Image (cartoon, rainbow, N blue to C red):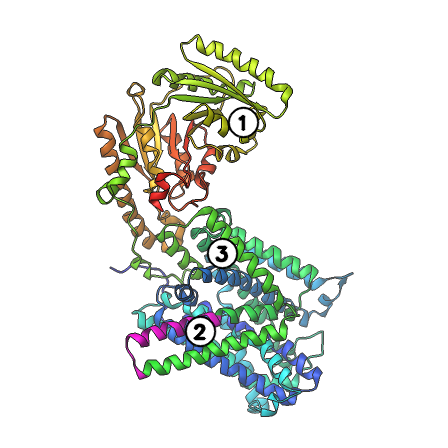
Amino acid sequence: MSVAVSHKLSNSLEGALAGGGDPATSPLYVFGPFLKLIVVAGVAEVTFGASIWLVVFTIATVSAMYRLVMSWVTDGSGGSGLTEEEFGGWAVKINAGITFVEYTLTFLVSMAALVTFIADRAPMLNQGIGPLTYRAIVAVVLSLLTGWLVNRGPKTAATIFGPATAGVLLLLWAMNIATVVKLGIHIPNFSLKAFTDGYLHYTLAGYSRILAVMTGIEVFANLVAAYDGTPEERSRKAFGSLLIIMGTAAVTMIITGPAIFRLADPTNEQVSVFTQTMDKLLPQWLSYTGTLVGVAVLLSACAASAQGLQNLALGLKDRHYIPEILGRRNKFDVADMPVWLEVGIASLCFLFIGTSEEIYLSIYAAGVFILLSMTGWAAAKRLVRSLREEFDLSHMGTFVGTVIAAFLTSAATVIIFAERLKEGAWTYFIFIPFLYVAFTYFRNKLGAPSPVLEELGRLEEAMWTTEALVPSELETVEIPPVPQEPWSASPERIALWRSKKQVPKNILVPLDGTRFAENALPAGKFLAKHYGAMMTLFSASEKASDLERMRSYLEKMARGIESEGIEVTCEVAKGKVAETIGVVAEKVAADIVIMTTHGRTGIAGMLHRSRAVEILRSLSIPSVIIRPRGGKVPPPRIDRVLVPLDGSIFSERVLSYVRALDPAFDSTVILLSVPDVPEPGLYGTLADVVARLRRKAEAQSRSYLEAIAGVLREEGLKVETVVTGSNPVRTILQVSEEKKVTLIMMSARGRGQASQTPLGGVAVRVLRQVRRPLFLLPVHKGTQEARNSE
C-alpha cells in the first residue's frame, strides 16, 4: 500500500532548489575571514591554494561518504538517525544540542552576512549611535520579520523564500563564467611549502575558516524520502541534488576563489570581498542584482534554520527531551516558540556582540564537523558489521573511503577547535553540556515516550517543513501493541487488582479552620456512612501556641459528625502539613485522604498556591481532592466515574478501588484510553500516514479497554469505554466535562513516567486544572506492582 503525499520531488534539480539554500550561500561569506587572515599575515601566495584544495578534497570525500549514507537512509532520518542508531542514546542528546546550536548559528551567520551585503551598497549602515550600529538595528528588524513569516507556516515561508536558491546558483555560475571570460582559468597553486614551519599554521587556520562552505550538506540525506521512486532512485536523486550544490561550491572555490584573491582587498572594512569582486567582474546592473540575490538567499537561509528549529522542537517534544510548551503548535500548525527563542538570541548577539559574520563562523564550522565526524564513524561502524557478515571487495573499498572521510572530518574538527578555540569554539564546552543536562532532566522527568512517538519525533527532527519534503516511509513503522488482555499473557497482573477490593476503613480529613477546607467533610461523611469507616480530623501548625486552639476546633467539628453516627478521632501535629500528614496517616492507619484545594493556611493554602505535589508525594495512600464551592455544599455523588487507563501496570492499580464502589452508588464506570499516536491533523502533510497509525492504535486501545470492561461487568458494574484524544491531560479534562462525571479515579503515574516519583506529570497537570472531584492513587517505586513492572 502506498501513501499519497503531495508535492513529491521528481528530480535532483528540484531537490537542490528545495533544500540547498543553506549550503549554497556559504561561498558568499567564507572568503572574507579567510583572505583577511592570510593576506594580512603575508603568507597568501603560499597558503591560499593549499587551503582551497584541502577544502575541495574535503567536499569530495564527505560527499562520497554521504552517497553511502543516502543508500541506507530512505525514511527521512538522514545522518542524524544513522548516528543515533549506531552510537546509542547519548548521541541523541549530543546531536540535538549541536543541531540546536547549529540552527541558531546558521541564523546568526546568514543574517550577519545579509546585513554585510546591504551595507556594501549603503555604507551609512556601518555608522550608528554610540556602540550601536545601524546595521545591528537592521539585523534585529529583519530577524523579527523572518521569525514572524516563518511562524505563519511553511506555505508562507516557501512562497517568500523558496525561489532564492535558484538565484544564488545562477549568481555563482555567473561569477565563474565571468572569471573565465575576463581573467581566464587560474587554478589555485598547491604548494607543499604551505605545510612547512612558518606556513602550516596559516594553511590550517585558513582551511578552518573556509570550511564553513560545508554547512548544510547533511540536509541532502534528510531529503531522500521526499523524492519519487524506489529507495534506490530516491537516494540517487538526493545525491544528485548534493552534487549540484556542493559541486557549484567546489567549482566556485577553484575558479572564482583566485579571482577574489586577486581583485579584492580584504582589509576594506566597508565592502565585502565578494561584492568587490562582483563589481569588477560583472556589469553594474548584474552586480547590483547579485547583491539583491545574495540578500534574498541569505534571508532564505535564516528562514530555513528557523524552520529546522521548529521541526527539531517538535521532534524533541514528542520524544520527551523538552517540555511540551516548547513544541506546542500555533494556529498555523508550527512550533513558534523555538523560533522566537532563536530570534531573541540572535537579536541580543547582534546588539551586544556585533554583526560581522566572522564572529560566528568558528563556532558554526566546529559544530558542522562534529556532526559530520559522528556520521562518518557511524557509517564506518555499519560497514564493519556488513563486512563481518559477508566479505566483499567492493564493500571493502567503500569502507576504506568511508574511514578516510571519517578521519578527515575528525581531523578537520580538531583543526577547527585548535585554531579557533579562543575565537568562540570554546563555547561548545559550555553549550553542549548545558543542553545535554537539560535534555536528560526533561527526559527523566517526563519519562520515555511510546515507541511510535519516538519514531515520529525522529522523523520530525529531520524533516524540513516545506511541503515538498515529506518522509513517505512512515507507513513502515510498526505500532508497538498496547497490552491486550494482559492477564492472558501475565496472570499475575490481573490478580493485582481483581483479587482485592480497597474498601476505606479510616478516612483522614485535613482541616485548617476555614469554610473552604470544611468542604471536604460532606464527602468524608458520605464515604464513612456507606463503608462503615471511621473519620480522623487532622490539623497542623508550626506555632505551638496554635495547637490547642486547633484541637478545640477539631473536637467541635467531631461532635457534629458523631451526632450522625460516625466514629471520629482528632489529631493535631506541630510542623508543616507536608511534613506531618504522612506521619499522622501512618499513625492512625488511614487508607484515604479527602481534602480541598483552597483555604487560608495549612494543607488547603498550600494546595491553593500550587504546592499540592509537595504534600501528595509524602502520602502513600490515595487522596480525593475536591474543588470547594461557596455557599451550601451539594450532597456528594459517585454515579459517573471516569477511569483513565494507558495499558500500564501502574494505571491498572486504580481498578482495585474501582471494584470497591458501593452498589448503592449505582455508578457507571467510564474507561478512557488516549492513543499513543497523535491526532493526524497535528502533522500537516503527514496526516494521511499518521491517520493509518492512529486507526491501528485506536483499535488496540478499544480491545484493551473492552477486555477490562468485561471483567468489571462480570462483577455487576455498568461500564462504558471511550477511546479519543491525543493529549492525556486535555482529554481527561474534556471527557470529564462532556460526560458530566462526578469523580475521576486515576493512578498518579502511568506508562513512561519516571519511576522515581509517585506523582507523574499528567497527574500534576490534571490536579491543577480539574474542576471535578479527583481520586489520585500514588505509585511508589517500592510497591510490589512497581517491582513487577520493572
Residue drawn 31% across and 75% down? Answer: 388
Q: Which residue is identified by label 1?
A: 603
Give the vertical position of 518 relative to 244 (above or below): above
Dot label at residue 123: none
Q: Quadrant of residue 477?
A: bottom left
Q: Quadrant of residue 674?
A: top left
Please provide percent x and percent y for residue 229: 30, 69
Residue type at tag 2: Gly
Label 2 crowding class (10 Å Cα cut-off): few <14, some 14-19, many 20+? many
At mark 2, the secondary structure is helix
Please tell me which of labels 2 and 1 falls first in the chain: 2
Residue type at tag 1: Ile
The residues bearing labels 2 and 1 have C-alpha atoms spaced at a distance of 57 Å
Residue type at tag 3: Gln
Give the vertical position of 760 relative to 125 (above or below): above
Contact, CB < 8 Å: mark 3 with mark 1? Answer: no
Q: Start and end of the magenta stretch?
A: 372-393
**Circle nearer the viewer, 3 or 1:** 1
Does residue 3 appear to the left or right of 543 in the view shown?
left
Residue drawn 64% across and 71% down? Answer: 358
Please tell me which of labels 3 and 2 falls first in the chain: 3
Contact, CB < 8 Å: mark 3 with mark 2? Answer: no
Does residue 282 appear to the left or right of 216 in the view shown?
right
Which of the pair 128/174 is nearer the observer? 128
Which of the pair 378/66 is nearer the observer? 378
Which of the pair 613/151 is nearer the observer? 613
The residues bearing labels 3 and 1 have C-alpha atoms spaced at a distance of 41 Å
Dot label at residue 376: 2
Number of dots carrying numbers = 3
Please provide percent x and percent y for residue 101: 55, 62
| Residue 176 is at least partly visible in this image | no
